[in-house]
Amino acid sequence: MRTKIGFIGDNDLASVEADSKFCAAHGLDGLEYNYWGNFKDLTRDTVEKMHDIHARHGVRCSMLGIWGWNHLSTDAAERAKAHEMLERAIKYGKILRAEVLTTGGGKLGDAPVAENVAEFVKVFPRFLDKVAEAGMRPAFYAVHGASFFVNLESYERVWETLPQVGIKYDPANWKHHGDDYLAVVRKHGDKVAYMHIKEHIYHNGELASQPAAGMGDIEWGKVFAFLYEHNYNGPLSVEPHGPVWSKGEMRHRMILLSQRYISQFLA
């Protein structure tokens, strides 16, 4: 398993510079970038400048993600725009030399899983081929971002036809959704393309905080045991999240504390 950890970076160029310096100073591995509707405003020139900053500091781009674009929309114009954004993301990911490209699977309104899967396996093969040709691995985030991937069954049905589809795995998200997050990685750790490090503390039945890894309710030792059993060697990315641990000095503390805690499981 890779021995270095990265984190989610902020997207403006000043922050790309600052986050790249922080990576280099603390032995962190790479930066992840996520965009929602604002992806339509991202220019090639900015992406090239991001790559140049990474190169100057010896930092890699671990992942490029775009969210909220419905690739399976029943509205032809909405679907066409989503596909345009996905094509652009593949081009930008190649410029950034991202390891993984992540997006939502799309959603056919309130249609059942079987119909969503059938449409997905018709729509996505050409995009999956382009992602691979660009040197990236495709990943799809569960329970998030305009996607029918809301449970393990939805992935399992897709894998019957498209086994190259990967999971962007965030155990805290699965837990918060009410699913058995350990079952995901125990059964299908070989399908994990990208690993998120995000912690949750639950108190009195509510999500009370999202601190550094090891300070909450996620059983990280068990998660990494199953990742080892499936020979995972993809990116490990810390996600500063929530109102307290995602800003300013607390963001830096959260990243470094998570790096220290998770490093005990890496060899």
Image: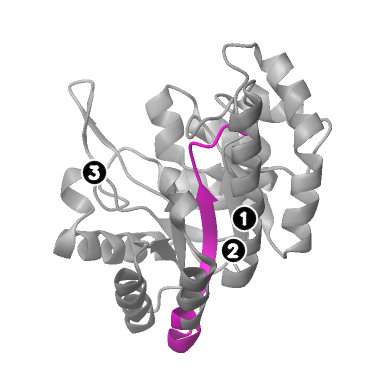
Confirm whether the magenta stretch covers residue 60: yes
Q: Which amino acid, by three-letter code, is at mark 1?
A: Arg
* Count of numbered labels shown in the rendering: 3
Closer to the chain start, of discs 3 and 1, is: 1
C-alpha distance separating marks 2 and 3: 28 Å
Viewer-nearest of labels 2 and 3?
2
Q: In screen coordinates, is 34 left or right of 77?
A: left
C-alpha distance separating marks 3 and 1: 29 Å
Residue at 53%, 57% (x, y): give it.
64
Residue at 44%, 43% (x, y): give it.
37
Q: What is the crowding at mark 3: few (fewer than 14 residues within 10 Å), some, or many (at least 20)?
A: some
Confirm whether the magenta stretch covers residue 250: no
- Circle number at residue 88: 1
Label 3 sits on residue: 242
Residue 60 % position (x, y):
52, 74
Q: Compared to 204, does 135 lie above or below?
A: below
Q: Secondary structure at mark 3?
A: helix
Q: What is the crowding at mark 2: few (fewer than 14 residues within 10 Å), some, or many (at least 20)?
A: many
From this viewpoint, is residue 59 visible?
Answer: no
The residue segment tinted magenta is 53-71
Label 2 sits on residue: 92
